[in-house]
Image (spheres, rainbow, N blue to C red):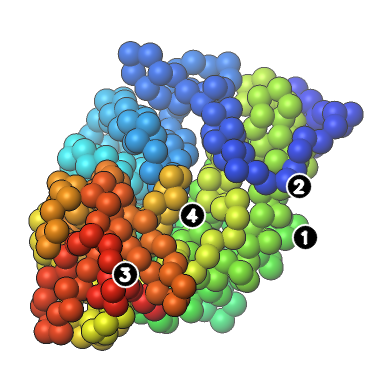
Amino acid sequence: MLALGLRLLLAAPKMAAALGSGDAVNMFNAFNNAFLSNGSSTFYKTSLQNQSPDGYWVGALDNQAAEDAYDVTGDPAYKTLVNSLCETWIANNEPPWDYVNYNDDIGWDTLALIRGYRITGNQDFLNVAEYGFNFAYSRGWDTQSNGGGIWECQPSACGYSEKDALSNDSLGKVACILYQSTHNTTYLDYCRGIYDWVWNNIYDPSTGAMNFGVYPSGQVDTALNAYNQGTWLDYAGLVYEITGDENVKNDAQKVLDFARNNLTSNGIFSNQDPSLNTWADDMAHGVARFLSDNRLWGNYYSWVVDNANGILANRRPDIGLTWNAWNQLTPEDDAGIPSIYVSAVAWLWWTPTTQPDQRVGIHTIVNQETGLAIDSAGTFGNGAQVVQWALNNGQNQRWQLSQNSDTSWNIISLSTWESLDCPGGSTADNLTMIQWQPSRDDNQRWWIDLQSDGTYKIWNKQSGKALDGASATQNGAPLIQWDWNGGPQQRWILQ
């Protein structure tokens, strides 16, 4: 079955399979050692033997391994790497992209770029991502058949007609992140509109299955794969974060359970097709997003780790990488391409080495003394004040907590998609906290420490000062910092 010179190492002993704290870093380093070119320009190579930059859409998929590395760790070195990779990718693939007939290719390209913008703040990445999305949507969205949807490939160029999950889910995700990045509500309309079209035409809400696509006749292509399932899961996670729609949360739960129960072998994702490119980044990200946001790791953690252990047990001994069949030893392929190995890298990045506690995820943050909640006031823009308001559980009061490799925390508003920020890292008492585009600089990193009464002390890494409600009881009161004194105005309840 494995031809063309693939050599299965059947006699080789399996490598250590117990997930450890350095395994994701080690596999990412192995991936970079095998494929990263970091000379005058930075890119992932086409293969172990071909030193030229990897191709258009697969190169963008490769880059997402570095974006995963930063998203999980907050390590500034990975931010620098992401910036260099995206700059090179644009230089090698400058718009216009009218020669690209496949809209799903543009989906993966723009997804890597808009994620790059969220990580680096590089305006060029946002500009090209916006161009790519608008180009693909304007030519690909067609209401003359199926009431809408984006063609995978433009019918005039490809000679066949199907609107599929590949194009709609990838570009739908881009629309969501464009909205988070710009607050342009047109992108919110696209984000939700594409989602609703897919839900009505391709998705099976009774089972949680994401079908491959739909033809103009209305006939559904019922082929299933982990790639489409994972992208839909990640898309649902984004829509839920942005809207708070419980129906979308329920969709995500069904999608996750369908993938776990129907697209695995004894619970392990495994596909030994040597022509299969990456498929698991969106699945890994989607699983981690859903479990973290909803604090459900306890229900799935052992399954996620089982997949990670399968990856570790079946690495190639020579280069330390694992192919897409995670329950089978990885063959040695002299012409191995990066996108066959990057899925395993992604899964390891998104698998916590210990089960996350209840601090992770979406919370309202309520002052013990007054019962007021930390509130973004829905005001988007760098420097906007953070206030306190009577608890209402609205989007302005929903904050996403995620952890960095130094164990500090990021606190992101689900209304503005900006970070809780201590301005300039100042040590001044009575200083009002603000929001700012996420940078993960030390003034946006927080320690969240459990106290003996079950409340939390939240204090800034750079200033060393604690969040303080100032005993304020009126709506709109500012959120300040102060030296820690342990009073109830400095103790916070995560709900």
Q: Quadrant of the C terminus?
A: bottom left
User: Front-most of 210 and 344?
Assistant: 344
Tell me the element at label 1.
loop
| The image quarter in which residue 247 lies | bottom left
Q: Is residue 445 left or right of residue 36?
A: left
Query: In front of the other: label 4 or label 3?
Result: 3
Q: Between marks 4 and 1, how big is the CA–CA gap?
A: 21 Å
- Read off the residue under disc 1: 266
Q: Is residue 384 left or right of residue 87?
A: left
| The image quarter in which residue 366 lies | bottom left
Q: Which mark is residue 327?
A: 2
Residue 133 horizontal/vertical position (percent)? 26, 50
Q: Mark 4 vs mark 1: which is more N-terminal? A: 1
Residue 391 horizontal/vertical position (percent)? 25, 85
Q: Between marks 4 and 3, how big is the CA–CA gap?
A: 37 Å
User: Front-most of 172 and 73?
Assistant: 73
Mark 4 and mark 2 in contact? Answer it, CB < 8 Å. no
Q: Mark 2 vs mark 3: which is more N-terminal? A: 2
Is residue 178 visible to us here?
no
